[in-house]
Image (tube, coloured by chain):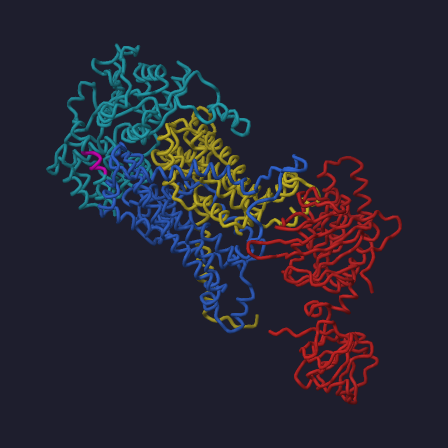
C-alpha cells in the first residue's frame, strides 16, 4: 500500500489533543473497519441504523458507508485506478456489468459465506452476491393528486404539473424512462420517444432534479409524483409524509441488487464478514420490516405482507431489462437527457 | 436643518432605505429560518415549524444515532485545524519574507500565492484528484489537508501581509540596533505585533476549510467525509431535519467565534480594510 | 572661530571617534551618498543638515548598519565596523517617530536592549531605573507608549537607546514630530544628556535652527556630498558654496561684476547701482560676474545716496516680534529683505537707499554660467 | 510606478544569525522564508493544475491516447457554448442583483454612527462565515413551494397559486444574492468609508439633490470598491456549485455541474479537464476585463 505522508492515527491523536472533539465515538479503536457503498436514502438509513451496529457487535468492525448511486460508485472506482476508495460495492444490474467489464471486482468465493446455504441457488457467483430485490414504480401524494395508472399518466394533467423528473444516472430512472418510452413506440434501446414526449410537456413539469434530490423535493412539496422504488416510498412514509406506491399497468420493474468486493481492497476478510452478515437472517429480517421494507433474499425470512410480491419467484412476472444492451448507450442518454431538459 | 426637503430627497430616503431593509432581510432571513426550523417537532422540514422541541438536537448529539455526522464533524475539524496550522506556519513565513520586499519577483510571488482565491474551487478539486490519484494516493484526510491548505492559505497570507506592511519598519531597525538578533526581534516585536492579523487570517482560513465543498468533494471518501459533504448528502436525499439542527449548531458556533474574534483581534475592521 | 574642540565635562566617559572614509552608497543606478568623508571627535555632536533626499539619512543608516555601502569605510575609535551587522554595532539610535514598541510598557521598552543581550535580573532593573530617572520619567514605568505625550515618548526612546551604553548615538530627525515649544526643551535636554555622558552623537535634521542650536559642527549635505563641514557660526558667516549660503538662513543675492582686484579684496559693481570694495576669495578674477550674498540683518536703509549705497523701491514692512522685516526691490528688479530691530526703525518709507551694514560679512560667489 | 522609485531595499540581506561570531556569516536572505510555501505551492497547487492541462490533451477516458479529441469534442458541441454562456450570464445577473440590493445598504452604512456601523458590519460578515450548505439549505426552506415566501404571499392574498422559485434561475439568483452579498459589500464599504464626508456636504451645499450627489459624486468615487466587489461576486457565483445544483436543480446546467458530472459521474477526466479549464479561462478573462476597467476608472480618479 501507499505510504501516507503522516499516519492517520497520529492525526487522530492530534485531533483529540486539540480538544473539543474527543467525545467522538469514532476514535475508539475497533478491530477493523470497512468502507461499503450504499444508495442514498432508504438504503443509507437502513444500513446505518441496522447493519452497522450489528457488524460492530458481531465482528467489532466499523462500517463506514458511502452513499453513492451505482454509476457514481463505478465512476469513483474507475477513477481511483487500482486504489479503490471503498471495499464493497452495492450495485444494480447495469452498473454490475460495467464493473465486471472494467475489472473492478475481486473474484468472489461464495463458499466463504456461512449463510450460502440460506440463499436460493445462483444468488452468489464468482462476481458477487445478490442481497435484495428492488421494485420500481410510481410514487404519488394521495392528498394532492389522484392515483396515476400508467407511466403515460405521468405526462398528463394533473400529474404532469406535479411531476418530479430525474434522468438516466440511476437504475430506477433509466428503467422508468425505458418503460415510458415503450408506451410511445420506443424500445429497450430507444428512449427518444420518451424524451420527445417529455420535451412537449417540459414547461409544466414541476421539478427536474438529481436522483438523490428527488425524495427531498417530494418531501418539500416541490413535486407530488415521481418514479422511484418501494424502499424510498417506505422511508418517506416513515417520516409522516403523504405518499403511496402504485404499480403501473404495464407492470413494476424489478431487479436484484448485488454486492461486490472491490479489487485491491485491503479489507478482504472483513468484506466477507460484512457480506455474510448482510445476507444472514438477522439483517434480512430486520430490513424487511418498516420503515425499510426491503425484499429479502434469505430463505428463512418470509416476504412481508405489504410487499408488492409474495415470493421471489414472482420476480419473473415483473419487467426486467437486459442491461448488457442498455449499458453501451447509457452515457449518451445521460448527456442527451441533460441537454433536452436544460432550459 | 432649515432646508426644505424636496420631493427628490424624500424619494431618495424611501428608495435607498427601502432597498437597504430588503437587503438586510435577504441577509438575515435564511439564517433565522434555518434556526427556527431546527426546533420543529415534526419529522419533516416545513415552514413554519410544527411545534417546538429539541428532539432533533437530541438526536444529533446522540452518539449512536448520529455517529456518522459526528465523525464527519470530527474530520472537518481535523482537516480545518491541520490545514490552518500548516497555513499559518507557511503563510506567516512567506509574508515575513515577502511583505517588505519591493523586488518585482516578490510582488509576482505574492499574487501567485493569492491565486487560489480566484481559481474556481471545482477546477482545483478535480486537478488535485487527478494529480493525487496519478501519484497513487487514495483519497484520505491527509490529501484533504493538503488541498484545503492551498485554498485557505491565501486568507492568512492576506491578513498577515497587511499587518506586516502596517508595521513601522523603524521598530525593527530599533530592535536591531538595540542588539537584538533577527530571531529575538521576530519573537518579541514582529510576531506580537502581527499576531492579531495572523489570528484573523487563521480564523477566516479555518472557517473556509470547515465550509469547503469543492475540494473535499473530490478528495474525500466514505472514511473521510466532511461535515458539509455529509450535510449536502442529507439535504439532497432525505432532507433530514438533523440538517437543520446541524445548521443551528454551526450558526451558533460561527456567531460565538465571530464575537470572540471581534473582541480579540477586531475582525470586522480587518475584513473591511 | 575655529572648528570647536570637543567639550569635556566633569568625569564624563571619553566618547569614541567616528570616521567616515570616502563612503559611497548606491540604490540601483542612483547614487545616494557619493564619496563622503567625515572625522568626528570624541564627545562631539555633529549635525547632518540638508534638504530631503540629500543622503543624510542614508549616511546615518550606513553608520547604524541598516544599509550597506558599495565603497568606503566606517571606523569607530579607528576600527572598521563595516563587517558587523546592525545588532552588533552597539550604536544607539532615536527615530523621528521614536519607534517605541507599542505592546511594551516604558520599563519593557527601556529594558529591551539589555534583555536582547541576554541580561536578566536586578541589574537590568537597576539600569532601567537609572535611565528613567535620568530622563525624568521615573513615575511612568508602567505606561504604554500610547499613554504618553510626544515629549515623554521621546525621553523613553532616548533612555532606551542609552540604556545599552552605545558607543555612538544617532538621532534621526528626533525633534521633527514635536511642537515648537517642546522642541526647544527637548533640544536642551538632549544636549544636556549628551554632555553628561560624553557621547559622540550624530543628528540628522533638515532644520537649520535645530542644527545650529544642538550641534558642535554641522555637515551640510547636498546631492550625496558634503558641501561644508564646519562650526555653526562659520557656516552661517562664511558659507563656502552658494548652496550652503542659500540653505542656511535667509539671504539676499545681488548680481554684479568684479571690476578690479587688489590683494585679498575686489571691487564689485552691483547691477543695482553701487560699487563696493569687499574681501574676495582668490579664485575670482577681474571681469567675473558674481553674486553677492548678504544676510537681511547686514543691510541697512538710509535716506541719502552715497557711492556705496543703491536705490530701492520700498515694499511692505512686517513687524515680527522684536524685529521688523522690510521688503524692497532694487531698480533692476531683485527682491530684497532687510531686517532691523523694531525699536530703532523710524516710521514711514522715506529711506529709499540701501547699503551694507558696517560689520557686514557678505560672501561673493562666481555666477554659474547656466 | 511607486515600487520602482521606492525600490531601495535590495531583495535580501538583513543579517540573521549572530551565532557565528565575527568573520564570515551565513546570511539567510529574508525572501528565502517564502521558500517553504513556494515549494508547497508548486507541489500541491501548480503541479495538479499543470497535470490537469496535460490530461485535457487525451482523447479517451482511460487516458491512453494523447490528442486534441476532448477539446474538439467539447467545443464541437454547441450545447457547451450555451452552458458557458449561461454560466457567465448567471455571474452577471448575480453581480447586478448584489449591486442593486447591496449598494443602498452600503450608503446607509455610511450614514450610521460608529456603533451601529459595527453592528451592521457584523451582520454583513456573518453569512460569509456560515457554511454555504447551511445557507443553501435555508433557502430551500424559504423558497420552497410550501416555503416561507409562498406562504407569506398567499397569506397576503397576493397570489393564489404558489410561485415556483426553487429550480428556477430567479430563485438561484435570489439565494446567490444573499450568499455573495458580503463579497460585494466589504470592498464597497472599505472604499466608501475612506471618502471624504465633506464631499457629500459640498455637493449638497452646491444645490445638488441627493440623487444627483449619489450618481455624480458617490458612485464614481466608489468605483474601485464596486469593481472589486463585482470581481469577487462574479468569481464566486459562477463557481457556486452547491447552490447551483441544489437550488437550481439539473435543468439549469452550468459549467460546475458539467464538470462534476464528467468527472465524478461519467468519469471522463479529459473532458472534465477541458470543461474546467474552460471555466477557469472564461471566468478569469471576465475578471481580467473587470479589473482592467477598475484600474482605468481608479486611475481616472487619482490621476
Instruction: Specify start and end residues of the magenta stretch as a single range.
Output: A329-334
Q: How many marks?
A: 0
Residue A333, magenta (yes or no): yes
- Per the rendering, the colour in which chain B appears is yellow
- Per the rendering, the colour in which chain A appears is cyan
- Per the rendering, the colour in which chain C appears is red
Measuring from the top left, give residue D237's x and y in whole percent: 38, 48
Residue at 74%, 53% (x, y): give it: C154
Question: On the picture, is B101 further left or further right than C292?
Answer: left
Residue C347, magenta (yes or no): no
Measuring from the top left, give residue C215's x and y in whole percent: 78, 59
Q: Nearer the viewer, residue B218 or C187?
A: C187
Question: In the rendered image, which quarter contains the N terminus of chain C?
Answer: bottom right
In which image quadrant can residue C52 be found? bottom right
Question: On the picture, is B57 further left or further right than A134?
Answer: right
Q: Is residue D105 above or below residue D252?
A: below
Q: Which residue lies most toward the left here?
A: A185
Q: Is residue B1 above or below residue B202?
A: below
- Per the rendering, the colour in which chain D appears is blue
Q: Nearer the viewer, residue B124 or A173?
A: B124
Q: Nearer the viewer, residue B14 or C163?
A: C163
Residue at 49%, 71% (x, y): give it: D208
Q: Nearer the viewer, residue D161 or B172?
A: B172
Q: Main secondary structure of the magenta part?
A: helix
Measuring from the top left, give residue C326's x and y in whole percent: 74, 80
Q: Is residue C62 above or below residue A53?
A: below
Residue at 78%, 39% (x, y): give it: C124
Measuring from the top left, give residue B54's x and y in whole percent: 47, 33
In which image quadrant can residue A77 be found? top left
Question: In the rendered image, which quarter contains the C terminus of chain C?
Answer: bottom right
Amino acid at each position: 500500500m501507499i505510504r501516507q505522508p503522516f499516519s492517520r492515527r497520529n492525526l487522530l491523536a492530534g485531533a483529540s489533543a486539540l480538544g473539543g472533539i474527543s467525545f467522538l465515538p469514532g476514535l475508539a479503536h475497533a478491530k477493523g473497519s470497512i468502507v461499503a457503498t450504499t444508495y442514498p436514502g432508504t438504503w443509507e438509513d437502513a444500513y446505518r441504523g441496522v447493519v452497522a451496529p450489528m457488524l460492530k457487535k458481531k465482528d467489532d468492525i466499523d462500517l463506514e458507508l458511502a452513499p453513492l448511486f451505482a454509476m457514481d460508485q463505478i465512476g469513483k472506482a474507475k477513477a481511483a485506478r487500482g486504489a479503490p476508495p471503498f471495499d464493497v460495492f452495492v450495485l444494480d444490474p447495469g452498473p454490475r456489468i460495467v464493473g465486471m467489464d472494467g475489472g473492478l471486482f475481486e473474484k468472489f468465493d461464495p463458499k466463504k459465506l456461512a449463510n450460502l446455504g440460506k440463499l436460493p441457488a445462483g444468488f452468489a457467483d464468482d462476481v458477487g452476491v445478490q442481497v435484495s430485490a428492488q421494485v420500481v414504480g410510481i410514487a404519488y401524494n394521495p392528498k394532492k393528486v389522484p392515483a396515476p395508472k400508467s407511466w403515460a399518466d405521468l405526462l398528463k394533467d394533473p400529474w404532469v404539473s406535479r411531476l418530479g423528473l430525474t434522468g438516466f444516472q440511476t437504475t430506477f430512472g433509466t428503467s422508468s424512462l425505458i418503460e415510458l418510452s415503450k408506451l410511445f413506440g420506443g424500445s429497450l434501446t430507444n428512449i427518444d420517444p420518451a424524451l420527445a414526449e417529455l420535451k412537449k410537456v417540459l414547461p409544466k413539469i414541476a421539478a427536474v432534479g438529481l436522483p438523490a434530490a428527488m425524495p427531498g423535493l417530494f418531501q418539500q412539496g416541490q413535486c407530488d409524483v415521481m418514479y422511484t422504488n418501494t424502499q424510498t416510498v417506505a422511508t418517506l412514509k416513515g417520516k409522516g409524509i403523504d405518499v403511496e406506491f402504485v404499480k403501473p399497468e404495464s407492470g413494476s420493474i424489478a431487479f436484484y441488487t448485488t454486492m461486490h468486493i472491490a479489487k485491491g481492497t485491503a479489507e478482504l476478510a472483513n468484506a466477507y464478514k460484512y457480506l455474510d452478515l448482510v445476507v444472514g437472517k438477522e439483517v434480512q429480517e430486520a430490513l424487511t420490516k418498516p420503515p425499510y421494507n426491503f425484499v429479502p433474499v434469505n430463505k428463512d425470512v418470509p416476504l412481508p405482507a405489504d410487499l408488492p410480491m409474495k415470493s421471489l419467484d414472482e420476480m419473473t412476472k415483473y419487467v426486467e431489462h437486459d442491461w448488457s444492451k442498455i449499458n453501451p448507450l447509457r452515457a449518451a442518454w445521460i448527456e442527451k437527457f441533460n441537454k433536452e431538459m436544460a432550459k | 436643518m432649515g432646508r426644505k426637503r424636496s420631493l427628490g430627497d424624500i424619494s431618495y430616503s424611501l428608495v435607498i432605505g427601502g432597498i437597504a431593509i430588503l437587503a438586510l432581510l435577504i441577509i438575515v432571513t435564511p439564517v433565522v429560518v434555518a434556526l427556527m426550523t431546527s426546533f420543529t417537532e415534526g419529522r419533516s422540514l416545513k415552514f413554519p415549524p410544527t411545534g417546538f422541541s429539541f428532539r432533533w438536537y437530541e438526536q444529533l448529539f446522540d452518539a449512536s444515532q448520529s455517529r456518522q455526522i459526528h465523525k464527519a464533524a470530527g474530520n472537518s475539524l481535523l482537516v480545518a485545524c491541520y490545514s490552518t496550522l500548516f497555513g499559518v506556519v507557511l503563510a506567516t513565513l512567506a509574508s515575513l519574507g515577502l511583505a517588505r520586499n519591493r523586488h518585482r519577483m516578490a510582488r509576482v510571488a505574492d499574487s501567485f500565492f493569492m491565486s487560489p482565491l480566484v481559481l474556481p474551487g471545482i477546477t482545483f478539486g478535480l486537478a488535485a484528484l487527478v494529480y493525487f490519484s496519478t501519484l497513487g494516493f487514495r483519497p484520505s484526510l491527509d490529501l484533504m489537508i493538503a488541498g484545503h491548505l492551498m485554498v485557505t492559505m491565501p486568507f492568512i497570507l492576506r491578513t498577515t501581509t497587511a499587518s506586516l506592511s502596517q508595521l513601522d519598519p523603524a521598530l525593527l531597525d530599533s530592535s536591531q540596533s538595540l542588539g537584538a538578533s533577527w530571531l529575538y526581534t521576530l519573537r518579541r516585536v514582529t510576531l506580537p505585533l502581527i499576531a492579531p492579523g495572523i489570528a484573523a487570517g487563521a480564523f477566516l482560513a479555518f472557517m473556509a476549510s470547515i465550509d469547503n465543498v469543492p475540494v473535499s468533494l473530490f478528495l474525500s471518501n466514505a472514511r473521510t467525509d466532511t461535515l458539509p459533504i455529509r450535510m449536502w448528502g442529507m439535504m439532497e436525499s432525505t432532507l433530514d431535519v438533523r440538517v437543520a439542527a446541524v445548521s443551528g449548531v454551526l450558526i451558533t458556533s460561527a456567531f460565538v467565534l465571530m464575537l470572540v474574534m471581534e473582541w480579540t483581534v477586531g475582525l470586522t475592521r480587518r475584513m473591511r480594510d | 572661530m575655529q572648528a570647536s574642540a570637543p567639550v569635556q565635562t566633569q568625569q564624563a566617559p571619553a566618547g569614541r571617534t567616528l570616521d567616515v572614509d570616502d563612503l559611497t552608497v548606491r540604490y540601483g543606478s542612483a547614487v545616494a551618498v557619493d564619496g563622503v568623508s567625515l572625522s568626528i571627535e570624541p564627545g562631539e555632536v555633529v549635525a547632518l543638515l540638508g534638504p530631503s533626499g540629500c543622503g543624510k539619512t542614508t549616511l546615518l543608516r550606513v553608520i547604524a548598519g541598516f544599509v550597506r555601502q558599495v565603497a568606503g569605510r566606517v571606523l569607530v575609535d579607528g576600527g572598521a565596523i563595516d563587517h558587523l551587522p546592525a545588532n552588533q554595532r552597539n550604536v544607539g539610535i532615536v527615530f523621528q517617530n521614536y519607534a517605541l514598541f507599542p505592546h511594551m510598557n516604558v520599563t519593557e521598552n527601556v529594558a529591551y536592549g539589555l534583555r536582547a543581550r541576554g541580561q536578566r535580573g536586578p541589574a537590568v532593573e537597576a539600569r532601567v531605573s537609572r535611565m528613567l530617572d535620568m530622563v525624568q520619567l521615573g513615575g511612568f514605568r508602567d505606561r504604554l507608549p500610547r499613554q504618553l505625550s510626544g515629549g515623554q515618548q521621546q525621553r523613553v526612546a532616548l533612555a532606551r537607546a542609552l540604556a545599552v551604553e552605545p558607543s555612538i548615538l544617532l538621532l534621526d530627525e528626533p525633534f521633527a514630530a514635536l511642537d515648537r515649544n517642546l522642541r526647544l526643551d527637548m533640544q536642551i535636554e538632549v544636549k544636556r544628556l549628551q554632555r553628561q555622558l560624553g557621547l559622540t552623537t550624530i543628528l540628522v535634521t533638515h532644520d537649520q535652527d535645530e542644527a545650529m542650536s544642538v550641534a558642535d559642527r554641522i555637515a551640510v549635505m547636498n546631492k550625496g556630498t558634503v558641501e561644508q563641514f564646519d562650526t555653526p557660526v562659520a557656516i552661517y558667516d562664511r558659507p563656502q558654496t552658494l548652496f550652503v549660503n542659500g540653505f542656511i538662513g535667509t539671504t539676499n543675492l545681488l548680481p554684479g561684476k568684479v571690476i578690479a582686484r587688489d590683494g585679498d579684496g575686489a571691487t564689485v559693481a552691483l547691477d543695482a547701482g553701487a560699487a563696493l570694495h569687499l574681501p574676495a576669495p582668490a579664485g575670482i578674477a577681474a571681469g567675473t560676474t558674481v553674486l553677492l550674498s548678504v544676510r537681511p540683518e547686514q543691510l541697512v536703509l538710509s535716506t541719502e545716496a552715497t557711492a556705496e549705497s543703491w536705490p530701492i523701491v520700498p515694499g511692505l514692512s512686517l513687524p515680527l516680534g522684536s524685529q521688523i522685516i522690510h521688503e524692497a526691490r532694487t531698480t533692476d528688479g531683485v527682491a530684497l529683505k532687510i531686517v532691523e530691530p523694531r525699536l530703532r526703525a523710524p516710521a514711514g518709507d522715506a529711506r529709499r537707499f540701501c547699503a551694507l551694514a558696517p560689520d557686514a560679512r557678505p560672501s561673493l560667489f562666481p555666477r554659474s554660467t547656466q | 510606478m511607486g515600487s520602482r522609485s521606492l525600490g531601495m531595499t535590495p531583495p535580501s540581506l538583513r543579517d540573521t544569525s549572530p551565532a557565528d561570531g565575527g568573520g564570515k556569516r551565513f546570511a539567510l536572505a529574508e525572501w528565502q522564508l517564502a521558500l517553504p510555501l513556494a515549494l508547497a505551492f508548486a507541489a500541491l497547487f501548480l503541479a495538479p493544475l499543470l497535470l490537469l492541462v496535460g490530461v485535457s490533451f487525451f482523447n479517451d477516458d482511460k487516458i491512453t491516447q494523447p490528442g486534441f479529441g476532448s477539446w474538439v469534442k467539447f467545443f464541437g458541441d454547441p450545447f457547451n457554448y450555451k452552458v458557458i454562456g449561461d454560466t457567465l450570464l448567471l455571474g452577471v445577473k448575480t453581480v447586478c442583483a448584489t449591486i442593486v440590493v447591496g449598494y443602498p445598504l452600503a450608503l446607509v452604512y455610511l450614514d450610521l454612527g460608529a456603533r451601529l456601523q459595527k453592528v451592521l458590519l457584523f451582520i454583513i460578515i456573518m453569512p460569509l462565515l456560515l457554511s454555504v450548505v447551511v445557507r443553501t439549505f435555508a433557502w430551500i426552506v424559504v423558497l420552497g413551494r410550501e416555503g416561507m415566501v409562498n406562504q407569506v404571499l398567499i397569506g397576503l392574498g397576493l397570489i393564489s397559486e404558489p410561485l415556483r422559485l426553487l429550480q428556477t434561475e430567479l430563485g438561484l439568483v435570489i439565494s446567490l444574492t444573499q450568499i455573495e452579498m458580503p463579497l460585494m459589500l466589504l470592498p464597497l464599504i472599505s472604499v466608501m468609508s475612506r471618502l471624504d464626508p465633506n464631499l457629500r456636504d459640498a455637493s449638497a451645499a452646491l444645490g445638488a439633490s441627493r440623487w444627483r450627489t449619489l450618481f455624480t459624486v458617490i458612485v464614481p468615487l466608489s468605483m474601485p470598491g464596486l469593481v472589486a466587489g463585482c470581481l469577487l461576486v462574479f468569481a464566486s457565483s459562477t463557481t457556486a456549485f452547491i447552490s447551483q445544483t441544489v437550488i437550481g436543480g439539473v435543468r439549469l446546467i452550468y459549467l460546475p455541474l458539467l464538470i462534476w458530472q464528467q468527472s465524478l459521474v461519467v468519469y471522463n477526466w479529459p473532458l472534465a479537464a477541458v470543461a474546467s479549464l474552460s471555466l477557469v479561462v472564461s471566468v478569469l478573462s471576465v475578471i481580467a476585463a473587470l479589473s482592467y476597467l477598475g484600474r482605468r476608472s481608479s486611475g481616472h480618479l487619482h490621476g
